[in-house]
Amino acid sequence: MPNVVAESSSCSWDDDLTMPYTLAAGILWFIAALLVGLVAGWVMRSAAAGRQVARARRRQQAESEAEMATLRERASDLERAADERDRLKAELEQLRSANERPAEPVTQAAGTPDLDAAATVLGRRLTHDDLRAISGIGPAIERLCHGIGIRTWWDLATADVSVLKSMLADAGPRFGMHDPTSWPQQARLLAEGRWDEFRALEARLAAQRGAAP
């Protein structure tokens, strides 16, 4: 009987020793699992954050590259526009230079044309620089020409037809029937002594007047 009591006391003592150890071990395992969970969670959050940072960097890099491409395209457009501007500016300068360049003076025929030859070809004697030798010009129109500085055949040869028309229009309605279109050409032929050509032109103008209604 005493042996039974002793064994019972020994078992109770052993149980008292095992329970705290088991509890401590459980607590340690719980703490270890908690730490492992915390570490795993931290690692997972770090990995997710790293992935987000990497995506943000890639997105930012893509946006930066797209912006750089846009800027390069704009710079290229600006460069082409600058080249076009320089080209147009150069063309404008050339046009200005051409417009500002003085017109080459018309060389007047040297000397006095041979009036004796004119008499032979035309059948009548001409007086040098007599504007009335021009078909269509009489004494009144000759005076009008003198009034605007046209006094010689060569002056008339280099006159603008629009100036002659304005002269006639300003002189009044009775001069409106006259057409000065051929006067500079006739005057040039006379000034250069081209009598045969002048006679042919004179005949052609007479034929046109005769054919007019």
Image: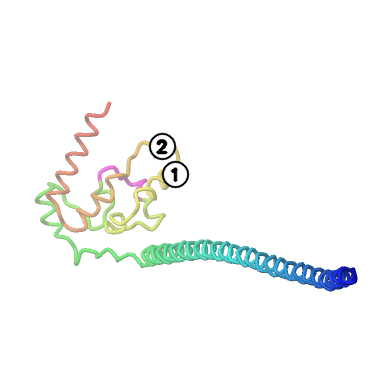
Mark carried by residue 171: 1
Q: Identity of the amino acid at label 1?
A: Ala
Q: Where on the picture, by quarter, is residue 33?
A: bottom right
Direction from residue 16 to residue 191 in the image, left or right: left
Q: Which structural element holds mark 1?
A: helix
Q: Identity of the amino acid at label 2?
A: Arg
Q: Where on the picture, by quarter, is residue 11?
A: bottom right
Residues 93 and 166: in front is: 93
Direction from residue 40 to residue 147 in the image, left or right: left
Residue at image position (36%, 46%) is 141
Residue at image position (22%, 29%) is 211
Quadrant of the image containing the C terminus: top left
Instruction: Tell me residue 110's x, y (percent).
Output: 19, 67
Q: Are marks 2 and 1 in contact (CB under 8 Å)?
A: yes
The magenta segment:
135-142
Determine the CA span between mark 2 and mark 1.
Answer: 8 Å
